[in-house]
Amino acid sequence: PAVQSARIVKGCRSMQHCEGTITVSIRHMSGDECIQLHVAPQTATSSVKKLIAQHWGIPEVFQRLVSGTVTLQDHDCLVATLKDGQDSLHITMILSLYGAQQDLASGERQQQCRALQ
């Protein structure tokens, strides 16, 4: 499985690293709550968004994940955003209407329905 373990913590305390995984700390934009995950290096951003939706109840279409100054795209592998020698990634989740707006403007019924869920 892509996700080895997950937990929600107040503030981002470091979590013991598991061999063969990367540690991802996802901070809610409010800054007072954090999800920490151990994931396989090839895990896609879309998989992380699903976990955020489960834990915080924020639909994937309203999530924008940012690492430093880079906005992560759904198809991006998390390991591609790591710098050489790093085994942890810090991400901020921003609540955004941009994804829903794009889905509504797409003209495709399935995407439009997804935006309205």
Image (tube, rainbow, N blue to C red):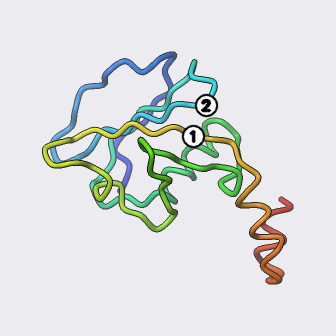
Q: CA distance from mark 1 to mark 2?
A: 6 Å
Please tell me whether residue 102 is drawn above or below residue 43 in the rendered image. Answer: below
Residue occupying the point 50% across, 62% down: 73
Position in image of residue 81 (x %, y %): 32, 53
Task: Tell me the residue at 57%/22% (across/down).
Answer: 31
Q: Amino acid at mark 1?
A: Met
- The residue shown at (21%, 41%) is 87
Q: Residues within 10 Å of mark 1 (few under 14, many from 20)?
A: many
Quadrant assignment for the N terminus: bottom left
Q: Considering depth in this image, is 39 or 64 the residue closer to the camera?
A: 64
x then y, percent, for residue 91: 45, 39
Which is nearer the N-term, disc 1 or disc 2? 2
> Is 115 rendered above or below residue 53?
below
**Mark 2 crowdedness (10 Å alpha carbons): few <14, some 14-19, many ≥20:** few
Residue under pointer 1: 93
Residue 64 horizontal/vertical position (percent): 60, 50
User: Given contact means CB atoms under 8 Å apart, are the residues at marks 1 and 2 in contact?
Assistant: yes
> What residue is disc 2 on?
29
Residue 116 image-quadrant placement: bottom right
